[in-house]
Image (spheres, grey):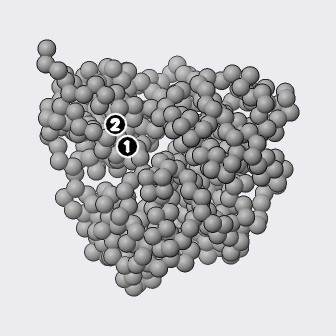
Amino acid sequence: MTNDTTSDMIEAAPHIKDFAGKRVHMIGIGGSSMSGLAELLMKRGYMVSGTDRDDGYMIGILRGQGANVTIGHDPEVVDGADMVVYTAAIAQDNPELVRARELNIPTITRAELLGQLMQGYEQAVGVCGAHGKTTTSAMLAQALIGAGFDPTVHLGGRFDAIGGSTRIGDETMFVAEACEFNASFLQLRPTIAVVLNIDADHLDYYRDIEHIQETFETFAAMLPDDGVVIGNGDDPRVRRLMDNARCRKISFGLKDTNDWYPDNLVLDERGRPKFGVVHDGKRVADAALAVYGEFSVYNALAALAAAVELGAEPERAAAALNAFQPVHRRFEITGTVDGVTLVHDYGHNPPEMRNAMKVAAMQPHNHLWAVMQPHTYSRLKGLFADYIHCCDEANTILVTDIFAAREVDPGDIHATALVDAMRGQGLDAVYTPTFDDAERYLRQHWHPGDLVLTMGCGNINLLNAQIEAHGDTREK
């Protein structure tokens, strides 16, 4: 398979290859994908500058690698740039974007940049789905490297096994997340699409779940005739997508009706899966994962199916996955304070939070604390009923203020509404608007042997860092 097909939209846009060695300015550079693209550009010799609304740990990393990053959006920082890249979350009246257009500086979106970087590779894999993209992409990268291949990789999180969120390999394989936010994955042209799940999310852009389904099917329809869809056969919506796809299909899942499935699956006392890997009815490898949860089995099977499709030997790919350690911010144990284990997870929609809570409940603990940072007003409104019970395994749930991200407060939704709804269902929920409030409440009520799980894709990970920086509570 080759990846020569390009869309009219990609062909019409300024191309990053025409700006080699020049300065690329990135608006929203601290985002999970943008920060990785910034790293990839710097590794390829581009000069990178950028801005973001808030500081964060990725900003410090990028600065350390040579990027000139400032906080806040100032039109003057665009002056002298040769190209401007912006995320879908950036409004068209953003002062930097307006300034770039006034100066006739070429502009492209984040998704267009990723699509351009993927061009020219013999094989390009786009991993999509409402959740699991980063982990599955990282698993695939590790499986390929362990099997002797040299892929180029772009992830939406930092992965120690590749030294960050990006890796430059040869020109045969490119592995990337394909994000459905604002349908941005339609800018990509993979030869292999891995579809993990199709769930309701990003309802500030999509009108409903059917709109999401249609967009995923459009993505699959853009594969070349000799392309491949590798899909979760246990997910009815993914199965529907595969039924409608014209190219070759490969299914994975827990059911033995799939092309790839587990044999004798067991979870140990902490939720780590062990199973035989079955492909086309034949056991081809053994897996004993160091990561947690049944959902990790889906991710591993998807990665194995894609790796074997790319030419990897199943045994070598599975052996590499047995050594897989999670991407940062994916059920990451960050430290211990007052004898309490602190864990952080990037989960921000209800299915992801439920999965993280199930894993947390299987870890040694006395009192289980969940600290949730709702992400965007539109997501909380659109999925409100699902959020109420996403932390049921916790003994106590702390809810911080909503992380607005790209949105303006509409005035009709507040974190206290979620707290009230949880209490109405008999849950012990507490409103702790700021990180200081959450830390104070935890320190006043926790005991050695407890476990605290913070969840969200905003800046809630900074709460863990804050607590750990303050150290053990000093007796007055």
Q: CA distance from mark 1 to mark 2?
A: 6 Å
Q: Is residue 335 left or right of residue 192?
A: left
Residue that label 2 marks = 454
Measuring from the top left, give residue 309's x and y in whole percent. 55, 75
Residue that label 1 marks = 345
Q: Examine the rendered structure and indicate whether residue 426 appears above or below residue 243.
A: above
Q: Is residue 7 left or right of residue 355?
A: right
* Amino acid type of the residue that numbered disc 1 sits on in the rendered structure: Asp
Q: Nearer the viewer, residue 170 or 415?
A: 170
* Amino acid type of the residue that numbered disc 2 sits on in the rendered structure: Thr
Task: Indicate the secondary structure of the residue bearing disc 1.
Answer: strand
Task: Indicate the secondary structure of the residue bearing disc 2.
Answer: strand
Q: Is residue 445 visible?
A: yes
Q: Examine the rendered structure and indicate whether residue 222 appears above or below residue 375.
A: below
Q: Nearer the viewer, residue 74 or 357?
A: 74
Label count reads 2
Tell me if label 1 and label 2 are in contact, CB under 8 Å.
Answer: yes
Considering the image in quadrants, where does the N terminus appear? bottom right
- Crowding around mark 2 (Cα neighbors within 10 Å: few <14, some 14 to 19, many 20+) is many
Instruction: Report the residue at 48% width, 56% height from top.
Output: 162
Residue at the extreme top: 476
Measuring from the top left, give residue 469's x and y in whole percent. 31, 28
